[in-house]
Amino acid sequence: MSSEAVHVSEPMTWKQICERYPDEWVVLVEVDWVNDTDFEFQSARVAGHGKTRKEPLIQARPLRDKYESMGHFFTGRIRAPVVPLIFLGRAASTPPSCPTRPSPSRRRRAVDDARRITGGVHVLDRLVSL
């Protein structure tokens, strides 16, 4: 599958992304960050979405050479237990509404899973939990 065959959405705000893809995992590209320390951004494009964590990563996989960074987020409310989200290619911070951090072993598993799913693309071991 070539990167041209993968559909990337128009730029949307986080609110619009959550409305269009409720309770789904999304991979975001072309994120227009408000600053370098927070989760807040002006707009982003959705490069993949799905009900499972793996589905949007597989959809966005052909784009990994085109985009320097990809964000992997969940649009719904996290129900226990808190599952770490992986941010590929750019340091990320924990959103203010989520003070909990994943344990080191859970972080290692999540990073290993992301490497396996993305075919070994470099994954920062900095995690974000929503």
Image: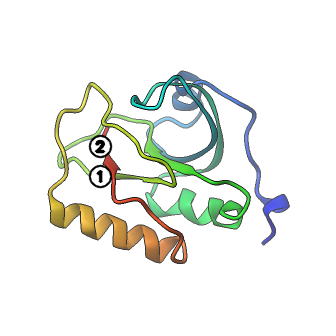
Q: For marks 2 and 1, give the CA distance.
A: 5 Å
Pointer 1 residue = 84
Q: Hey, what amino acid is under mark 2?
A: Ser
Residue 38 picture location, percent across and down: 40, 28
Measuring from the top left, give residue 3's x and y in whole percent.
79, 62
Per the image, label 2 sits on a secondary structure element best described as loop
The quarter holding residue 124 reads: bottom left
Residue occupying the far right of the picture: 4
Left or right: 116 in relation to 64: left
Quarter occupied by residue 96: top left
The quadrant of the rendering that contains the N terminus is: bottom right
From this view, report whether residue 119 is shown above or below residue 86.
Answer: below
**Where is residue 105 drawn, in percent x and y?**
17, 67
Amino acid at circle 1: Pro
Which circle marks residue 129 in the picture?
2
Percent from the top left, x then y, of residue 128? 33, 44
